[in-house]
Image: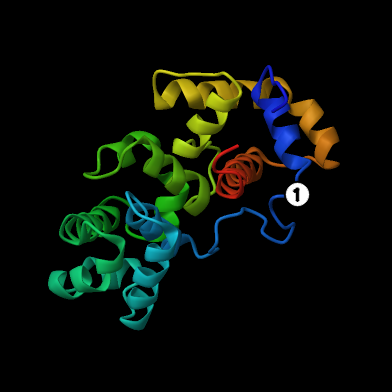
Amino acid sequence: MTSISNSYELLVYLKNQNLIEDHLEFWWPNSNSFEILIAAILTQNTKWINVEKSLENLRELNFLSLENLASCDLSILTQAITPSGFKNQKSKRIIQLAKNIIEEFQTFDSFCQKVNRTWLLNQKGIGPETADAILCYACRQEFMVVDKYTAKLLSRFGYEFDSYYDIQSFIVYGINENYDKIIALYGYEISLNKLYSRFHGKIVEFMKRNPKV
């Protein structure tokens, strides 16, 4: 593989491979913000194909709204999300999260506008990666998601990090330091939220296509 000295060079390397179709503006497979919130929790420790099965079950039950989820029957929700694994744990945490959102923010739109990382990290079952996925993809805030794919890809380039936050700092620093170059690269003034979401998407898609490179 080629060498890189910062995350901007990694972005250029990935962008040249046309990993994401242009119409997938923010990369995440679904543009419905509330579904993204739920999917970010369901996808913990499982594959996306399993999450899709659970989401379809939730759609059929009309559970994919904040109010309906907060008041749904626990046993029915547990059964619906079985494909995603850890069904008992996840179902309890999803219902409690929905209730907490209503109590704190009243509506989901208000939640997206006002929620911060600290609040999310105080919710049971939400760690740094899930919090950043919710903020980036559901709330469209300027947060870069890093994950096991990011760590593995950077390892291939010779970079090893001690924590999630170290990886995130490396990625974010290179982007911010080279933002003018990135605007030239894209040909327009891309927002940081869109850039972070597409950058994360490129990393995921590259690693899926090149698992053993």
The C terminus appears in which quarter of the rendering? top right
Badge 1 crowding class, 10 Å Cα cut-off, few under 14, some 14 to 19, many 20 or more, is few
Number of numbered discs overlaid on the protein picture:
1
Where is residue 28, by image quadrant?
A: bottom right
What is the x, y in percent for residue 195? 66, 41
Work out whether residue 147 can be spotted: no
In the rendered image, is residue 80 in sight?
A: yes
Task: Name the colouring of the figure.
Answer: rainbow
Looking at this view, name the residue that lies furthest to the bottom.
60
The answer to which of 134 and 17 lies nearer the viewer is 17
- Residue at x 49% of width, y 30% of height: 151
**Relative image position of residue 155 (x, y in whole percent):** 53, 25
The residue shown at (74%, 57%) is: 22
Q: Give above or below for 184 relative to 158.
A: below
**Image position, residue 56 (x, y; %):** 39, 76
Examine the image and state in which quarter residue 116 appears: top left
To which residue does mark 1 refer?
18
Farthest front residue in view: 212
Q: Amino acid at mark 1?
A: Asn
Q: Is residue 84 above or below residue 20?
A: below
Q: Is residue 65 above or below residue 164?
A: below
- Position of 182 with respect to 55 (left or right) is right
Q: Nearer the viewer, residue 116 or 38?
A: 38
> Does residue 64 sit above or below 91 in this rendering?
below
Residue at position x 21%, y 56% from top?
86
* Apparent side of residue 11 relative to residue 94 in the rendered image (left or right): right
Using the rendered view, name the quadrant where residue 156 is placed.
Answer: top right
**Picture coordinates of residue 10, whole percent (x, y):** 68, 29
At mark 1, the secondary structure is loop
Observer-nearest of 49 and 93: 49
Q: Quadrant of the N terminus?
A: top right
